[in-house]
Image (cartoon, grey):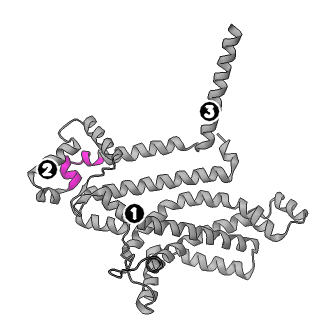
């Protein structure tokens, strides 16, 4: 009887260890850190307006909004945020509102903050997503080719050009492209994401979006390209001196196979790590680029909200941007685990 109980107990422990191992393989070791960062962001977003001197409603909405509010609207907002109750009740109302997608009410746009942001967020995601994919792909290919032909004229030219471009901020590159292609040559649109009142449909509509996207996208890609290229090139130079590359060459593998299947594949690991670190810079750059090109994304929306002192909208945009950065970094960690299985078992 005792042996059967011990056997069942051991089986239960093995099952728990197996489940724990699967969870560790599924999520990166930094998963708890992401949860802590997420909780800290929510708490700061809740606490900071309430720590400001004066009326909490004035800290959330600003004095200008309160002047324009009717007493009925002010009473409704106090009830909605539970500002006449304890902090614990206010926190419960805040978390419940976030779970329901309620980020507050924008008094400038006369609409829910979540709806205002969702109208601009797809344009920003389109711009930053394409910039990240294109810059990473081109930077990898150029870095692999340059590192494989170290010291050649191609290598020296690429290093000089991309280091020169990488020294400029993205909004400065955007202004130059705007002056050249939109003002002087007049081959691309000056601003916006689509042509107003054009009535395009289907492929014509997609082509119109791409024409408006070309200049802001090129600005972000040119600035991001240098860092990816240099990291890939330096990694390739280091990898080509490793013993496993010498072994592959001794076996008679073709140069193209060595370049991409062996050295190129291993050069993805540091680039993936750097991509996670570049995402906040990419999103920040997109906010400035959108202002330069009057692109109807989150950056232009944030600029309008700051000018109008629409505090709930500013708060909602910063919260969404922070959540986007955390989510993309988490996805990069998952991708790194797939590229390098050693990371999966490191902890």
Disc 3 target residue: 19
What is the distance, in whole Å, between disc 1 and disc 2 at their CAs? 29 Å
Q: Quadrant of residue 212?
A: bottom left
What is the distance, in whole Å, between disc 1 and disc 3 at their CAs? 38 Å
> Split into 4 quadrants, where in the image is the N terminus?
top right
Q: Nearer the viewer, mark 3 or mark 2?
A: 3
Residue 280 in percent (x, y) is at 47, 60
Residue 164 in percent (x, y) is at 57, 78
What is the distance, in whole Å, between disc 3 and disc 2 at their CAs? 51 Å
N-terminal-most mark, 1 or 3 = 3
Magenta stretch encompasses residue 126: no
Q: Nearer the viewer, mark 1 or mark 2?
A: 1
Query: Do callouts 3 and 2 mark residues in contact (Cβ within 8 Å)?
Result: no
From what the image shows, is residue 112 above or below residue 189?
above
Res 54 seen here: no
Res 146 seen here: yes
Q: Residue 74: which numbered mark, if any?
A: 2
Residue 50 in percent (x, y) is at 25, 45
Q: Which span of residues is magenta-colored? A: 48-61
Helix, strand or loop at mark 3: helix
Extreme-bottom residue of the structure: 185
Disc 1 target residue: 121
Q: Is residue 157 left or right of residue 57?
A: right
Extreme-left residue of the structure: 71
Binning the other alpha carbons within 10 Å of mark 2 as few (below 14), some (14 to 19) or many (20 upward) gives some
> Split into 4 quadrants, where in the image is the C terminus?
top right
């Amino acid at each position: 009887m005792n042996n059967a109980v011990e056997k069942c107990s051991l089986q239960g422990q093995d099952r728990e260890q197996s489940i724990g191992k699967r969870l560790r393989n599924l999520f990166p070791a930094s998963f708890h850190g992401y949860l802590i960062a997420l909780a800290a962001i929510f708490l700061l977003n809740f606490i900071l307006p309430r720590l400001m001197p004066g009326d909490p409603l004035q800290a959330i909405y600003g004095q200008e909004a309160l002047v324009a509010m009717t007493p009925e609207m002010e009473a409704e907002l106090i009830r909605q945020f539970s500002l006449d109750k304890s902090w614990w009740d206010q926190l419960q109302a805040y978390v419940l509102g976030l779970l329901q997608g309620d980020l507050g009410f924008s008094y400038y746009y006369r609409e829910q903050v979540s709806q205002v942001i969702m109208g601009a967020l797809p344009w920003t995601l389109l711009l930053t997503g394409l910039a990240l994919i294109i810059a990473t792909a081109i930077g990898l290919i150029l870095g692999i080719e340059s590192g494989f032909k170290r010291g050649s004229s191609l290598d020296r030219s690429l290093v000089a050009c991309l280091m020169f471009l990488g020294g400029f901020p993205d909004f400065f590159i955007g202004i130059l492209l705007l002056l050249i292609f939109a003002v002087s040559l007049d081959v691309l649109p000056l601003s916006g994401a689509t042509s107003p009142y054009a009535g395009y449909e289907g492929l014509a509509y997609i082509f119109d979006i791409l024409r408006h996207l070309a200049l802001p996208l090129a600005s972000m890609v040119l600035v991001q390209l240098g860092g990816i290229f240099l990291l890939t090139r330096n990694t390739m130079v280091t990898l080509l001196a490793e013993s496993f590359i010498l072994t592959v060459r001794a076996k008679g593998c073709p140069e193209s196979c060595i370049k991409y299947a062996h050295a190129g594949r291993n050069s993805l690991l540091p680039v993936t790590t750097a991509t996670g670190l570049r995402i906040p810079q990419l999103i920040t750059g997109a906010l400035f680029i959108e202002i330069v090109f009057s692109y109807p994304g989150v950056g232009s929306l944030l600029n309008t909200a700051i000018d109008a002192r629409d505090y709930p909208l500013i708060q909602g945009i910063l919260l969404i941007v922070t959540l986007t950065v955390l989510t993309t970094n988490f996805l990069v960690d998952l991708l790194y685990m797939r590229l390098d299985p050693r990371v999966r078992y490191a902890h």
